[in-house]
Image (spheres, helix red, strand yellow):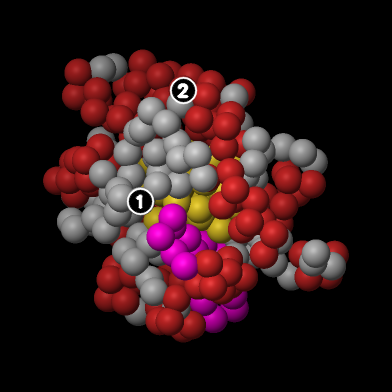
Amino acid sequence: MATAEAKKARPALERHLLARRDAGTSSLAPFLTVGDPDADFTVEALERIDRAAAAVCELGVPYSDPIADGPVIQSSYTRALAAGTTVETVFDVARRASGRIAMPLVAMTSYSIIFRRGIAAFVAASKDSGLTGLVVPDLPLEESADLDAACRAAGLALVRLVTPTTPRERAEKIARLSTGFLYCVSVAGVTGERSVLPDTLAERVRWLKSVTDCPVLVGFGVSGPEQVRAVASVADGAIVGSAVVRHLEAAPQTPRSQLLDSIESFVRELVTA
């Protein structure tokens, strides 16, 4: 296990989640698309999610060609892009929200977006905006050294993912390099709500926790209180994306305050689970 000095040297996001784990508290990490239906709504929704006691929130950076996102999040990205959301919008939302909330924010983005701006510039903008880490699903382990070094120098986490099809030798390398938390993808395929999770998930999570001290959070297919409860029994937390984002589909015909109430109530229910 890591020494106290080693833990202190970790990114703030990881220290936050480790403190929760040490206190025996599981961590819920909702996912929210930035700019759907608009940036101001995203800031308000983040305040509500924080009020519902989520541990951390992932900000989805809208992208025209999603890598692993199912239809709910793809549609949300399309709406956000149509509304004019850009990477600058994401940084602005993070900057505005981080001054009003207690929970850390991490951005989930395609590496192509980071590469286009430049690693140094993107990491600097992320840090300046108040983000505490990045999740980059399409960044191969073998090509991640430069971004890893830049994130470590800036004190940002670089969250890495392991999937059900990742060979154990490779999964162990990924687990040991991940900072902030290790994203354990529960099922093969894309994001989306599912009625059941794999029977092998618990054993896989226990093995991952045996090879890294980094908190392990499970995502993909985790959509309701019962699944969150099952995941929390073996992992350090659960990531819920599509089930949260689905609320945004009602934005055109639902009063803003009612929609915010709905999101807060749903997240609170998941936190309670």
User: Is residue 189 on the magenta stretch?
Assistant: no
Q: Quadrant of residue 34?
A: top left
How far across and how far down the image is residue 145, in percent? 48, 82
Relative to 124, is 69 on the left or the right?
A: left
Which residue is at a point 77% across and 39% down the rendered structure image?
Answer: 24
218 vs 3: above or below: above
Out of 184 and 10, give the one closest to the viewer: 184
Residue 128 badge: none
Secondary structure at numbered mark 2: helix
Disc 2 crowd, CA 10 A, few/some/many (<14, 14-19, 20+) = some
Can you see residue 264?
A: no
Identity of the residue drawn at 46% across and 26% down: 224
Q: Nearer the viewer, residue 232 or 36?
A: 232
Residue 173 position in % (x across, y down): 56, 74
**Which residue is most to the right?**
4
> Residues in magenta?
148-167
Q: Which mark is residue 266?
A: 2
Which of disc 2 and disc 1 is earlier in sequence?
1
Q: Quadrant of the N terminus?
A: bottom right
Q: Amino acid at mark 1?
A: Ala
Which label sits on residue 188?
1
Q: What amino acid type should be assigned to the residue bearing mark 2?
A: Phe
In x, y percent, where is residue 234? Answer: 64, 41
Mark 1 vs mark 2, foreground winner is 1
Q: Is residue 230 above or below residue 254?
A: below
Residue 108 in view (yes/no): yes
